[in-house]
Image: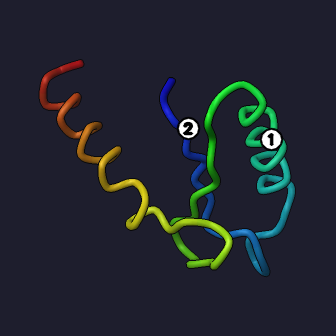
Amino acid sequence: MRQLYFLVPGTSGAFRGGGLFAELKTLALAQEICGAALVTYRQREAEHPFWRTCCVGAIAALRLCHRLGL
């Protein structure tokens, strides 16, 4: 099964709120049934991978699927 990535801008400071709480709860549910990880895209954090360093292969695969019309 594929790994799910939950993209959030960050998890501290200005990024804390109801939307982040809902995303974290959804992540916890997804982790019970498949591989899932929290990935940040605006703020780099030691405890979570940054999107440019962890999702390069996934982004390339999405671009290929888009070009092929899949």
- Give SS at disc 1: helix
In the image, residue 9 sits, relative to residue 63, either above or below, namely: below
**Which residue is the site of mark 2?**
4
SS under mark 2: strand
Crowd rating for badge 1 (residues with CA inside 10 Å; few <14, some 14–19, many 20+): some
Residues tagged 2 and 1 counted as in contact (Cβ below 8 A): no
Q: Of the residues shown, which amino acid type is indicated by label 2? A: Leu
Q: Residue at x 26, y 38 (%)?
A: 61
Graded by Cα atoms within 10 Å as few (under 14), some (14 to 19) or many (20 or more), the crowding at tag 2 reads some
The reply, left or right, for residue 50 in relation to residue 26 is left
Mark 1, residue position:
28
Q: Residue at x 57, y 58 (%)?
A: 39
Q: Quick one: label 2 or label 1, which is nearer the N terminus? A: 2
Q: Quadrant of the C terminus?
A: top left
Q: Is residue 44 above or below residue 4?
A: below
- At x 53%, y 73%, the residue is 42
x, y percent for residue 62 = 29, 37
> Marks 2 and 1, Cα distance to the nearest angstrom?
12 Å
Residue 8 image offset from top left, x and y in percent = 62, 59
Would you identify the image quadrant in which residue 18 lies? bottom right
Left or right: where 7 falls relative to 16: left
